């Protein structure tokens, strides 16, 4: 029989080893990327036959250690056709998963050649995400079509109800009743107004469903532009809350926006991984959203609690601004109609 003290000692040793590994991992996270040291050996370029010292030919830029072709070389050349051959792409993906905030700070501090450009990475990852959601996943399931059909089915049902009302209202008196989904409603229709109808004393715009459908269709077909729009919309309030921070006290809005692009890239990477192995699972998108607190905490040096509170404050500010804008637009529209 195994003694309890042996179990406790073994458990304590395992926990101590895990703690040491975690501490080493934290040190690695904070350590910037180190460029390979410059070679002091003499090289002769295989392309232009220039003799030089270093890692790359100063005349044509070819690597000093070109070597023979391998599967790895062929794979990188294949990816280069799509703009992914740069090894900084794989390093950027790795660091965005394991050390996102520290990587973004290194990039903002000038280490730009070590990582893939944020905006180029943004468009490439969106394209890859669309490919995965279009059926390139383990279940061969088209998530985009499925989501689009679900949204449009709801809109079509609502639009059909509106058409039913409009058709019956055309033959109605000044006041009449119609039955929709088992319920009777009182309808009124102005003789010269074909774009609205009054149901139970409330005026309904018949073109509303069509407008919503067009907007939804455009959003589904232009995912990249929608993400850029939300990025621009949310970066403003977030910048107000994070511009005075511990690690980058004088951060500019342009720098903050670049950091938000990288954070969006991190979320897209999570979406691609989850979409490939677990297509159609909404919980993975929620987890990816929660992961945004990690790079913000690492990048700006706040605690997780203060980071969460600042993000919540930025969202409240954004919602308040949108509501205020909607009220102003409604007031202006009312004044124009009165004129």
Image (cartoon, helix red, strand yellow):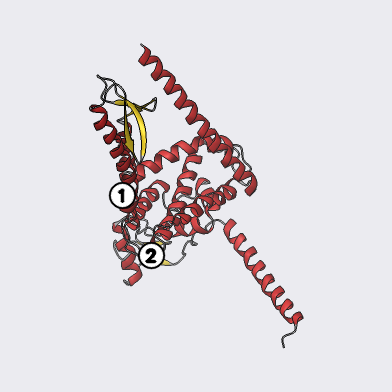
Residue 9, position in %: x, y? 73, 77
Q: Nearer the viewer, mark 2 or mark 1?
A: 1
Q: How many marks?
A: 2
Answer yes or no: is residue 114 visible.
no
Answer yes or no: is residue 111 visible.
yes
Query: Residue drawn 37% across and 15% down?
Result: 336
Query: Residue drawn 42% across and 60% down?
Result: 273
Q: Nearer the viewer, residue 171 or 291?
A: 171
Residue 198, position in %: x, y? 35, 25
Q: Is residue 41 left or right of residue 132?
A: right
Work out which quarter of the rendered image holds the N terminus and state it: bottom right
Query: Residue drawn 28% across and 26% down?
Result: 195
Q: Secondary structure at mark 1?
A: helix
Q: Secondary structure at mark 2?
A: loop
| Image vertical order of residue 313 relative to residue 36, above or below | above
Question: Mark on residue 64?
Answer: 2
First in sequence: mark 2 or mark 1?
Answer: 2
Hey, which residue is sitting farthest bottom in the picture? 1
Q: Is residue 147 left or right of residue 306?
A: left
Picture quadrant of residue 138: bottom left
Question: Mark on residue 149?
Answer: 1
Determine crowd level at label 2: few under 14, some 14-19, many 20+ residues with C-alpha closer than 10 A.
Answer: some
Q: Nearer the viewer, residue 220 or 85?
A: 220
Determine crowd level at label 1: few under 14, some 14-19, many 20+ residues with C-alpha closer than 10 A.
Answer: few
Query: Residue drawn 40% across and 38% down?
Result: 229
- Mark 2 → mark 1, Cα distance in angstroms: 55 Å
Picture quadrant of residue 51: bottom left
Residue 67, position in %: x, y? 35, 70
């Amino acid at each position: 029989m195994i003694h309890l003290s042996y179990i406790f000692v073994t458990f304590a040793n395992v926990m101590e080893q895990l703690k040491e590994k975690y501490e080493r991992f934290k040190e690695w996270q904070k350590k910037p990327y180190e460029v390979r040291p410059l070679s002091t050996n003499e090289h002769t370029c295989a392309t232009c036959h220039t003799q030089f010292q270093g890692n790359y030919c100063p005349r044509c830029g070819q690597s000093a250690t070109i070597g023979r072709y391998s599967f790895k070389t062929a794979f990188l050349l294949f990816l280069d056709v799509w703009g992914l051959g740069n090894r900084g792409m794989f390093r950027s993906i790795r660091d965005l998963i394991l050390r996102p905030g520290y990587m973004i700070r290194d990039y903002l501090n000038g280490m730009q050649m070590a990582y893939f450009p944020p905006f180029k990475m943004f468009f490439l990852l969106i394209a890859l995400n669309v490919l995965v959601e279009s059926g390139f996943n383990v279940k061969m399931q088209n998530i985009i079509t499925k989501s689009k059909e679900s949204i449009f089915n709801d809109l079509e049902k609502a639009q059909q109800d509106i058409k039913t009302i409009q058709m019956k209202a055309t033959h109605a008196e000044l006041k009449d009743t119609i039955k929709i989904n088992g319920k009777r409603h009182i309808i009124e229709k102005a003789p010269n107004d074909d774009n609205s109808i009054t149901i139970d004393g409330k005026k309904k715009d018949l073109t509303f469903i069509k407008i919503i459908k067009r907007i939804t269709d455009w959003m589904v077909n232009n995912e990249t532009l929608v993400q850029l729009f939300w990025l621009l919309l949310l970066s403003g309030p977030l910048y107000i809350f994070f511009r005075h921070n511990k690690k980058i006290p004088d951060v500019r809005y342009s720098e903050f926006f670049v950091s938000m692009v990288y954070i969006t890239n991190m979320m897209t990477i999570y979406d691609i991984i989850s979409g490939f192995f677990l297509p159609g699972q909404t919980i993975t998108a929620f987890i990816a959203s929660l992961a945004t607190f990690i790079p913000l905490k690492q990048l700006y040096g706040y605690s997780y609690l203060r980071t969460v509170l600042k993000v919540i404050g930025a969202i409240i500010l954004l919602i308040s601004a949108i509501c205020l804008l909607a009220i102003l637009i409604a007031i202006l529209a009312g004044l124009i109609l009165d004129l």
